[in-house]
Each structure stands twice: as structure tokens, then as C-alpha cells.
Amino acid sequence: PASAASGSTGPASGAGASPCAAAAVTLPPEHVPWDYQIGGAYPPAAGVRVVSRSYEDAPAEGLYNICNINAYQAESGEENDWDADLLLRDAGGKVVHDTDWDEAVLDIRTAAKRERIAARLDTWIDTCAAKGYQALEPDNYDSFTRFPSYLKAPQAEALMKLLAAHAHAKGLAVAQKNTAELLSDRASVGLDFAIAEECAEYDECGAFADAFDDNVLVVEYTKKGLTRACADWSSTLSVVRRDEDVVPEGAGGFLRETC
């Protein structure tokens, strides 16, 4: 069952929550070997106990599996799968893109649009649950920080509340991905544990560790980040280094290191 320290009952305990929202969730084991496989699944290394994978992939047998969905941006090449008015547009009507990943940004600025976005994402969450995943990782929670002239934190939180409520109703724990500036709202939003990219690199691991009672899965992408994570956090948090494209083992550029 979820740990009370992380406020993990989330929306299930709040007024207006549906009765089914109280499905028990199981948090990931803390301080264990883990792997970040959102760019493609491959057999986990010996000893690995937690893995995060794309909702399109199957969970790893016998491990704690986290299901990654792109919740705030459209996957590269998939923006046409979304209703045109659900894509964020600039003053000239052009779709706003996260150019680092060639992903169209979703328009979360109104409650009506958030409801429609959530309805589609909920079908992916249902897929996660049906496949046997134990948790959900809604990615790009921090999109608002990259497009501040369009998006605001309360809009991101409002969408996350919808997703967390649906995930909890399906028995899935929900990860806060990055977004340290919203850690103080984790319980009201309904977030249970954290996946923190480069928190050692940017000196944020302590904030995540404090907020989620050490239930934090750390991903570093540089030698410096891993060295710092291992020195400061390997005794309490789960740490892995991956290549930036998180490609599967056997693909060019694959890298996986631990402390």
C-alpha cells in the first residue's frame, strides 16, 4: 500500500472523488537497482527491480513496472493523431514545438481542452493497467517551464489531477516526473513518488528526496551527474545513468551505468 508520508492517497481522499478512486496503489521499492527504458525495451540487467517503459511496450516479468506516457506533448510524428485545436499554437496559428524532441505541445489552457486531452490519455492509462503495470509516469509535466508565454503551472497541475485520479482508480501509483518547482503541491495533485532526471547534475535530488520520503528514481545522463549522484545519493535513492536518447541495448549509442 501507498506510504502516508508521500501523501499518496491523492485525489482518492479528497471531496468529490469517485468511490472507485480509492483502489490501493503499490509504490516502487526504494533504493534498488533500476532501469529507464522509455526509448525501447530490452532485458533488464541482473538485480534490477524497477523499470520504466513506454506504454506501447510490455512490462518486464517479475519486476515493478512503471508505464511512461507523453502527457503534455505529442510524440514526434504523431501530432496529426490529435484534434487540431488541442495543439498549442502561436499568435500566427502555427503549432508550438519542443524543438529538442520535435514534439508538438498540447494546449492545456482551458478546462474543456484538458478534459478532452485527459480522455485520450486515459485510454493509454487503461492500456498500462491492462498490461499489468504498477505505476504511471506522465511525462513532460514541466512543459510549462519551457513555454512560459503560453502555459502556466496551475494548468499543468489541473491536467495532472485528472490523470492521477484515473490512474489511482485503476490501481496505478503515479510518478512526479521532474518539475521540482511543483513539489509542494504533490499531495493535492495526487503524486506518489518521483522520477528525477539529472537531479544530481542540478542539485535537486535533496528536494525530491525530502518531498517523497526517499522514494525517488534518479536518471543521470552525464558522467559528472552519475559521479555526483553516486557520491551523494546512492545510499538512499535508486540511481542509473542512461544515454540521452534512452535507446535499447544493442542500438548505437546505448549506455547504462550504475554506482
Image (cartoon, rainbow, N blue to C red):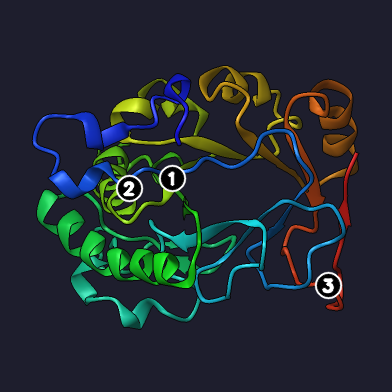
- Percent of width and height locating residue 92: 25, 65
Q: Mark 3 = which residue?
A: 249
* Quarter of the image with the C terminus in it: top right
Mark 3–mark 1 Cα distance, whole angstroms, equals: 26 Å
Q: Mark 1 = which residue?
A: 174
The mark lying in front, picked from 1 and 2, is 2
Quarter assignment of residue 210: top right
Q: Name which residue lies at 39% across and 25% down.
A: 7
Q: Name which residue lies at 33% across and 36% down.
A: 190
Instruction: Determine crowd level at label 1: few under 14, some 14-19, many 20+ residues with C-alpha closer than 10 A.
Output: many
From this view, report whether residue 36 is shown above or below residue 180: below
- Percent of width and height locating residue 29: 64, 39
The mark lying in front, picked from 3 and 1, is 1
Helix, strand or loop at mark 3: loop
Q: Name which residue lies at 49% across and 66% down.
A: 132
- Please report whichever mark, 3 or 1, sits nearer to the chain's N-terminal start: 1
